[in-house]
Image: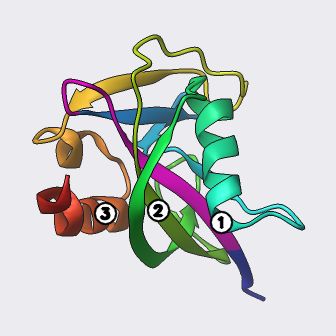
Amino acid sequence: MEHHTQTAGGVVLNADGDVLIVNQGGVHWSLPKGHIEAGESALVAAQREIGEEAGVDELTLIKELGTYQRYQMNWDGSNNPEEFKDITLFLFHTKQRELHPRDADNPSAKWVPKNEVVYVLTNPKDKEFFFGIVDQL
């Protein structure tokens, strides 16, 4: 049976206009995001996840970018049909440059020029969403 989860995260831009990308499990690259915990708003969850996955805590909210849906990815890159996610993303700016992931499941993070992000993201739905909002960055 399919489990439906609410997740939130962000497109984080630094002063050079580069985009924050995080590594999940040492396998996949994605925008920082994660599950919305009980009592959290999507915005608070997005800020918490960005802090955990990249160590970026100085965030200035610009706007909400929208929500899209996809299945959770298995480590082999296939879809996990048991978990379907609603992913809400926000646009943030930060003056922070140094990245210090605090979540062992997300071991690394990097800044990527915005015109290269779509080539780095692993999941096709993440690529599709980013391609649709890149002109707003």
Residue pictured at 49% horizontal, 32% vertical: 23
Q: Say whether residue 25 is visible.
A: no
> Which labelled disc corresponds to residue 20?
none
Which numbered dot is residue 124? 3
Tag 3: residue type?
A: Pro
> Is 114 situated left or right of 38 in this image?
left
Position in image of residue 52 (x %, y %): 68, 32
Q: Give the amino acid at mark 1.
A: Ala
Q: Earlier in the sequence, mark 3 or mark 2?
A: 2
Residue 111, position as x, y percentages in the image: 32, 25
- In this image, 112 relative to 76: left or right? left
The label shown at residue 89 is 2
Range of residues picked out in magenta = 6-17
Residue in view at x 78 percent, y 89 percent: 1
Query: In this rendering, is residue 120 above or below 106?
Result: below
Q: Is residue 13 above or below residue 88?
A: above
CA distance for labels 3 and 1: 23 Å
Determine whether 59 is above or below 124 in the image. above
Q: Amino acid at mark 2?
A: Leu
Q: Nearer the viewer, mark 3 or mark 2?
A: 2
Does the CB distance between marks 1 and 2 fall below 8 Å? Answer: no
Q: Earlier in the sequence, mark 3 or mark 1?
A: 1
Dot 2, crowdedness within 10 Å: few (<14), some or many (≥20)?
Answer: many
Mark 1 = which residue? 42
Magenta-span inclusion, residue 12: yes
Circle 1 packing at 10 Å, graded few (<14), some (14-19), many (20+), is many
* Residue at disc 1, secondary structure: helix
